[in-house]
């Protein structure tokens, strides 16, 4: 993803996928785990919520402070940004260890987790729109788990979208494993 337009389309599609695939499901199905050590649909979304709680405000601050971009600017990627994107690409089947405070495994979750996820998507889409006037190629975003490292604003937006795609695919795979007689949606 090299442009804000591509990232915006991806996030827009992710929001609509979540609405279509998960909103109709009963709470028990949203909490269904195919295996004890795997995540439920809501745990996948809670993981993304935890990242959004960090990255959305940091991105909002960076975008507001970095005027001077243009809507068609190409996003530049640092070595760290490329490495981060490669780790979270959905097609990268290699499992990554989640830092402890971002791991929602065995959390008690309700429908508000899904609602919060959708709210974060709306907020992210608004940030992407505001980012059209920001310089996306300034290193302003501290990495969540090691704040001394910084990413460019644009590559962070791309990271967030790809990370979401990875875990939405994970949640959709859980949906495919729901007990057949209960998964009418």
Image (cartoon, rainbow, N blue to C red):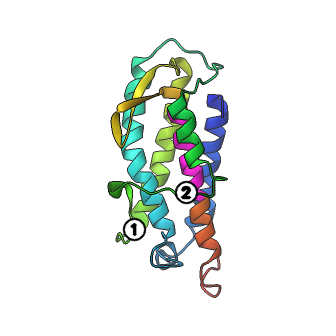
Res. 94 image quadrant = bottom right
In depth, the one of 79 and 131 nearer the eye is 79
Residue at the image position 60 percent from the left and 24 percent from the top:
75
At which x and y percent is residue 129?
Answer: 55, 29
Dot 2, how many residues are within 10 Å of its Cα: few (below 14), some (14-19), or many (20+)? many
In depth, the one of 164 and 143 nearer the eye is 143
Tell whether 64 sits left or right of 132: left
Outermost residue, bottom side: 181
Residue on which disc 1 sits: 105
Tell whether 21 sits left or right of 135: right
Which element is circle 1 on?
loop
At which x and y percent is residue 152?
Answer: 49, 26
Q: Earlier in the sequence, mark 2 or mark 1?
A: 1
At which x and y percent is residue 112?
Answer: 40, 62
Magenta span: predominant SS is helix
Q: Quadrant of the N terminus?
A: top right
Q: Quadrant of the C terminus?
A: bottom right
At which x and y percent is residue 3?
Answer: 65, 28
Which element is circle 2 on?
helix
Whether residue 158 is visible to the viewer of this picture, yes or no, is: no
Tell whether 147 sits left or right of 162: left
Part of the protein shown in magenta: 156-168
Whether residue 22 is visible to the viewer of this picture, yes or no, is: yes
Residue on which disc 2 sits: 167
Separation of marks 2 and 1 at Cα, in angstroms: 14 Å
Q: Is residue 2 magenta?
A: no
Whether 167 is drawn above or below 85: the answer is below
């Amino acid at each position: 993803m090299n442009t804000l337009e591509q990232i915006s389309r991806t996030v827009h599609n992710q929001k609509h996928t979540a609405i279509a695939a998960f909103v109709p499901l009963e709470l028990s199905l949203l909490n269904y785990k195919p295996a004890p050590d795997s995540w439920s649909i809501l745990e996948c979304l809670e993981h993304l919520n935890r990242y959004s709680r960090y990255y959305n405000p940091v991105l909002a601050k960076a975008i507001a402070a970095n005027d001077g971009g243009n809507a068609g600017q190409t996003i530049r990627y640092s070595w760290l940004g490329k490495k981060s994107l490669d780790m979270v690409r959905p097609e990268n089947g290699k499992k990554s260890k989640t830092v402890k405070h971002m791991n929602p495994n065995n959390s008690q979750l309700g429908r508000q987790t899904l609602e919060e996820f959708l709210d974060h998507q709306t907020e992210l889409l608004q940030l992407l729109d505001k980012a059209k006037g920001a310089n996306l190629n300034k290193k302003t975003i501290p990495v969540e788990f090691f704040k001394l490292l910084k990413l460019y604003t644009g590559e962070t937006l791309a990271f967030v979208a790809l990370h979401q795609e990875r875990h939405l695919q994970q949640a959709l795979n859980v949906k495919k494993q729901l007990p057949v007689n209960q998964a009418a949606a």
